[in-house]
Image: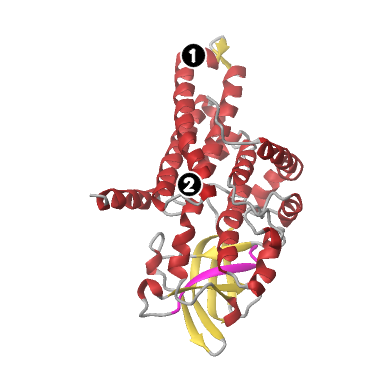
Amino acid sequence: MDRGLYAAEHEAFRETVTTYVEREVVPNMERWEEARLVSRDAWLAAGRQGVVGLSGPADCGGGGQGDYRYRNVVLEELARVGANSLSSSFSLQDDILIPYVAALADRGQRARWLVPMCHGEMIAAIAMTEPGTGSDLKGIRTTGRKVEGGWRVSGSKTFITSGIQSDIVVVVARTSPEGGSDGFSLLVVEAGMAGFSRGRKLKKIGLNGQDTAELFFDDVFVPRENLLGTEGGGFRQLMRHLPLERLSIAATAVASADAALAWTLEYVQQRRAFGQPIADFQNTRFVLAEVATELDVTRAFVDKAVMAVGSGTLTAVEAAKAKLWATEVQHRAIDRLLQLFGGYGYMLEYPIARAYQDARVQRIFGGTNEIMKQIIGRDLIGRR
């Protein structure tokens, strides 16, 4: 069945991405995994070649692309070589931070932040999660106390992607204790501000090449010109862009599982047991058939969501469905495919092992899958 997602211009862009991946990513992946950090050289090269910054406005040096198919090409090509850590970091920049800044920044902020972000010269992070909040954003305790000329930010954040390298951090802070959901603002903390410090580079069971950190804010003065969007509008502003983040996670899940299937198909045809290729065993063929079918069906829904986000019609519920289902399929597929590798599937020298580790967080990212079920279920009940 013809997938029907890409046109000639998308496949031409794929050649650019493939060249970038082979030249800048593949030779450095092991080093990044060991350092638990992707080098800035990879970001700068991605900026020069237009691999990052796709969602940014053209007048700020971005790709000016509302067409998510270009981003999907990047996700697929990075997944093909198992570069999940870099893919996750780029997704944060292109699918979360750049859209936030592009939608909310004034002219001066666009020049200061958006232009270098689109060029890969500035790495951004968003600080939402706190030690005691998790998916409960309304439980955020980091405060922004209003003072002359700005705010004084105090509190801590954890599990912050790009937390070590980030040049700017969009901090979700409670700026009005009595404001309820209207009491949160997005305040941009810049590297070097007095009172801003980074804690541990956190050790994880996957995505080891992606730097994840604790961040601390000890009475950090954030000037008025670093308010992103409107004061008190932070919660609504966050909600507006969550569907795109969840689509990104779903698309990554499909791309990663598809790459794992390709690696497994190659392996089972080369590996022999009991005098024949593993591919000749009925169990192997049944597993491959089931995984391929689940992936094809899942891809059809996610591809439709990719087109919907480009037309501005993707709903929060549809994005939640895509994220929930695709990440569950990713987990199930990679687990079953790894089994076909036997003991070698447990060795990190095989990309399937790293893909297995990297997949686990997908059901937690962007709101846990339990939260996705809540969103979907609430919508179903509300229809009656």
Does residue 278 appear left or right of residue 14 in this picture? left
Does residue 42 appear left or right of residue 363 in this picture? right
The kind of secondary structure element at disc 2 is helix
Determine which of the numbered discs, if any, sits on residue 281 in the image: 1
Q: Nearer the viewer, mark 2 or mark 1?
A: 2
Residue at left 76%, top 53%? 48
Q: Residues within 10 Å of mark 1 (few under 14, many from 20)?
A: few
Q: Residue furthest bottom?
A: 148
> Could you tell me how far apart the alpha carbons at marks 2 and 1 are, in whole angstroms?
31 Å
**x%, y% of residue 260?**
56, 32
Q: Say if 258 sits above or below 48 in the image.
A: above
Residue at left 34%, top 52%? 375
Residue at left 51%, top 79%? 153
- What amino acid type should be assigned to the residue bearing mark 1? Phe
**x%, y% of residue 146?**
49, 85
Residue 166 magenta-drawn? yes
Q: Earlier in the sequence, mark 2 or mark 1?
A: 1
Residue 294 magenta-drawn? no
The segment highlighted magenta reads 164-175
What is the tally of numbered marks visible in this picture?
A: 2
The kind of secondary structure element at disc 1 is loop
Residue at left 48%, top 46%? 362
Residue holding disc 2? 362
**Residue 185 seen in this snapshot:** yes
Viewer-proximal residue among 77 and 225: 225
Q: Say if 147 sits above or below 290 in the image.
A: below
